[in-house]
Image (cartoon, helix red, strand yellow):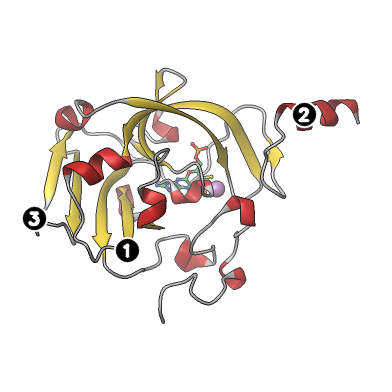
Amino acid sequence: MGQRASEAHEHPRLPPGQRLQRGWPVTHYGPVPKFRPERWEFRVFGATADGDKHAWNHEEFSALPYTTVTADLHCVTKFSMTGAEWGGTPARTLLDLVPPAPAVTHVMVWAEYGFSSNLRLSDFAAEDTLFATHKDGEPLTAEHGYPLRLVVPRLYAWKGPKWVRGVEYMTADRRGFWEERGYHNIGDPWREQRYSYQEEPGEGPAA
Ligand SMILES: Nc1nc2c(c(=O)[nH]1)N[C@H]1C(S)=C(S)[C@@H](COP(=O)(O)O)O[C@H]1N2
Ligand SMILES: [Mo]
């Protein structure tokens, strides 16, 4: 019991049903995309306040404000990786640069190969939601999302696409990749919102 008790003491705030993972496993669906800087762009589109689309190339995106967030990663398959220092650009910065129309309630975050995840605007706008380029001072590796991944510390990690390429502002909710495949529409690990069958009325998109 000694080892587990001391781990529990070090990490008293692991969400229910999660266990601590030593190291940092790689978890995703499909192949690791090859980064081609000349073809890469990051787009914000959908219901923007001015009705326009906005795009940054890699050099432009790299020049956006940089900050760090220390946060844990909770995979719905029950492992957690704690104490990472993520570096990157806050989602809030993008919301300031490209304000959403007043009717926007959700965003779809898009990644390479059409991977997507939907978020409530409130979760996306949270102060610790970060478009990360670095972890613990080092650039992300290809398999962990280089050149850019989203980190949403308050939700299960599938809500943070690796190899992210854009954000769509939405005036109604719509399920993303894993949310269409049986995972919870909101995905709060503290409420153990793992699977879509657990959704309460109002937690999923209107049918
Ligand atoms: N593009 C993409 N991003 C993704 C996934 C994926 O399948 N595709 N899986 C998610 C899941 S389920 C988890 S747990 C984390 C894992 O991140 P890691 O491999 O860096 O640990 O990435 C998330 N981001
Ligand atoms: Mo995961």
Question: Which quarter of the rendering shows the N terminus?
Answer: top right
Pick whichever of labels 2 and 3 is earlier in the sequence: 2
Q: Amino acid at mark 1?
A: Thr
Q: Residue at x 47, y 60 (%)?
A: 178
- Residue at the spot of label 3: 52
Q: Amino acid at mark 2?
A: His
Q: Is residue 146 above or below residue 165?
A: above
Which numbered dot is residue 9?
Answer: 2
Q: Residues under labels 2 and 1: Cα distance?
A: 38 Å
Find out whether the residues at labels 1 and 3 contact each other: C-beta distance under 8 Å: no
Pick whichever of labels 2 and 1 is earlier in the sequence: 2
Find out whether the residues at labels 2 and 1 contact each other: C-beta distance under 8 Å: no
Q: Quadrant of residue 88?
A: top left
Q: Quadrant of residue 194?
A: bottom right
Which numbered dot is residue 105?
Answer: 1
Q: Give the number of the mark in front: 2 or 3.
A: 2
Q: Is residue 12 above or below residue 120?
A: above
* Position in image of residue 51 (x %, y %): 9, 59
Q: Give the number of the mark in front: 1 or 3.
A: 1
Give the SS element for disc 2: helix
Q: Is residue 200 visible?
A: yes
Q: Residue furthest front?
A: 102
